[in-house]
Image (cartoon, rainbow, N blue to C red):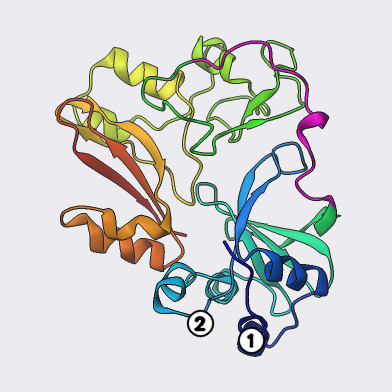
Amino acid sequence: MAGARQEDLDRVERELGLPLPRTWRDQLSAENGFRWDDGAGVTGLVFRALPVRCGSDRKRMARTAQDIVWHTERARADGLPADALVIAVHDAVPQRIALRGGDDLWIQRGTGALEPLGVRVGEFAPGAEALPPVDELLPVFRFHPDPVGSGVLRRSPHTCPTCDRARGWEYLGLPFGRETLEHLCPWCIADGTAAARGASFVDDHSLLRGGVAVEVIAEVCDRTPGIPGYQQAEWPVCCGEAAVYVGPLDPEDVDAVGGAEREAVRAVIGHGGVAHRFTCQVCGSERWWLDLP
């Protein structure tokens, strides 16, 4: 996206009552919103650096409506301090990156307190050379076929607690279970090794209620990466089968949602939530889990 105009940057400062740090103002002047890949950094995630609302024409104004001001005002309702502004968000995982008057970065996880990240703007999103090489293909998850795209798997230097290997990828969330198993590799999820240690990744209530076969419930709950969110995820059922997870809906794609769900999806995203899209593997229809803070 082209750089932001100076008058639009000035408007953000007026509306929030805060100055944009010079480094970030210069960044937005060069590129007004961009993909910020911290896969090799402290978060291991890919964030969406927020634009400022562009007033040059209606089309660009609509595309940049959910800008720094929009997200900061909603984060303040979740306890964001008045001296902070949100500059980046993750669309699948409820995390926000913020600045507080300088170049030091802060993070808000869910509705928790703002925490220092320990890095500055120029140190965030380092190159991939910091990560171990990967010499094997990622496993295939039938009910969650793109866990990298959906944001639940990330590149990682950490050692998996079940296979004791640093395999270059890890699961973002924490599974349910008797042990705290951080940094699980996707291979140990797929082959059931993590489940053998008591880990599960999806609550089975909606699947049981929908009459899904026991062996499918075991595959979804015990051998499929879960979906981190504000609330406990409810996996949709359609045509008697567990639906396939596609990923979080990009806020710009709300108008493409069909049927009666469009306004519900729009309302959830408008309140800072995430619309998680699934498809039925039998009839092909869309199904949704709407996650609100």
Q: Is residue 130 above or below residue 30?
A: above
What residue lies at 30% left-to-right and 17% top-to-bottom?
216
Mark 2 and mark 1: Cα distance apart in space: 9 Å
Question: 27 or 78, which is in the foreground?
Answer: 27
Residue 11 in sight in this render: yes
In the picture shown, does residue 98 fall above or below 169? Answer: below
On whether residue 88 falls in the magenta region, the answer is no
Question: Does the rendering let one see residue 120?
Answer: no
Q: In the rendered view, tell whether residue 105 sits above or below residue 58.
A: above
Mark 1: secondary structure: helix
Magenta range: 123-139
Q: Residues within 10 Å of mark 1 (few under 14, many from 20)?
A: few
Q: Which residue is mark 1?
A: 7
What percent of the width, then of the height, locates residue 105? Answer: 78, 60
Report the side of 185 relative to 237 (left or right).
Answer: right
What numbered label is drawn on residue 55? 2
Tag 2 and tag 1, C-beta contact below 8 Å:
yes
Pointer 2 local density, CA inside 10 Å: few below 14, some 14–19, many at least 20: some
Q: Position of residue 185 (x, y in %)?
A: 63, 20
Q: Residue at x 22, y 32 (%)?
A: 280
**Of residues 205 and 43, the one drawn nearer to the viewer in this rendering:** 43
